Image (tube, rainbow, N blue to C red):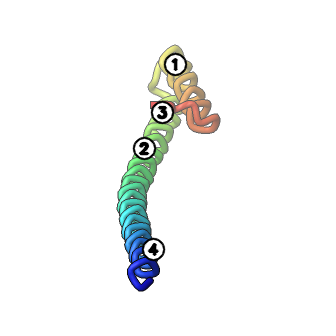
């Protein structure tokens, strides 16, 4: 009788322990994945900020170039078109790469 009652209890305890251990391992793996994603996200945000600064500097440079009196008209028009392209790309978020 003791053996009959003890075996199911022992199996239940082993099953519960295995389930708890596997749950812990899955949670630890999920936590590591989240940490990796968070660090990748931070790196991407830094890259985006650097690109935004570069685009703003290029936009300012093109604006200055197109408004300078010594710049020929065709160069100024090209600079204005490029400035419009930069605005279109950044405002509509067409930067896929």
Measure how far apart labels 3 and 2 are at the Cα level. 16 Å
Q: Position of residue 14 (x, y in %)?
A: 38, 72
Judging by the rendered image, the residue that carries numbered circle 4 is 8
Q: Earlier in the sequence, mark 3 or mark 2?
A: 2
Mark 1: few/some/many CA within 10 Å (<14, 14-19, 20+): few
Judging by the rendered image, the residue that carries numbered circle 1 is 78
Q: Position of residue 91 (x, y in %)?
A: 63, 38
Of labels 1 and 4, the one closer to you: 4
> Could you tell me if the residues under marks 1 and 4 are in contact, i.e. CB atoms within 8 Å?
no
- Residue 62 — which label? 3
Measure how far apart labels 3 and 4 are at the Cα level. 79 Å
Q: Position of residue 5 (x, y in %)?
A: 46, 80
Measure how far apart labels 1 and 2 are at the Cα level. 22 Å
Going by the picture, which residue comes out furthest to the bottom? 2
Q: Secondary structure at mark 1?
A: helix
Q: Earlier in the sequence, mark 2 or mark 4?
A: 4
Q: Secondary structure at mark 4?
A: helix
Q: Secondary structure at mark 3?
A: helix
- Residue positioned 57% across, 30% down in the render: 94
Nearest to the observer: residue 11 or residue 19: 11
- Residue positioned 44% across, 53% down in the render: 45
> Could you tell me if the residues under marks 3 and 4 are in contact, i.e. CB atoms within 8 Å?
no
Nearest to the observer: residue 58 or residue 30: 30
Of labels 3 and 4, the one closer to you: 4
Mark 3: few/some/many CA within 10 Å (<14, 14-19, 20+): some
Q: Earlier in the sequence, mark 3 or mark 1?
A: 3
Where is 76 relative to 10, above or below? above
Say which quarter of the image contains residue 84.
top right
Judging by the rendered image, the residue that carries numbered circle 2 is 51
Nearest to the observer: residue 10 or residue 97: 10
Mark 2: few/some/many CA within 10 Å (<14, 14-19, 20+): few
């Amino acid at each position: 009788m003791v053996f009959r009652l003890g075996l199911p209890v022992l199996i239940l305890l082993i099953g519960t322990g295995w389930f708890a251990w596997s749950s812990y391992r899955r949670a630890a793996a999920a936590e590591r994945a989240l940490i990796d994603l968070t660090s990748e996200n931070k790196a991407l945000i830094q890259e985006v900020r650097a690109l935004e600064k570069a685009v703003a500097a290029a936009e300012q440079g093109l604006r200055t170039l197109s408004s300078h009196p010594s710049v020929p008209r065709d160069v100024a028009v090209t600079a204005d078109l490029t400035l419009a392209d930069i605005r279109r790309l950044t405002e509509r978020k067409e930067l896929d790469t």
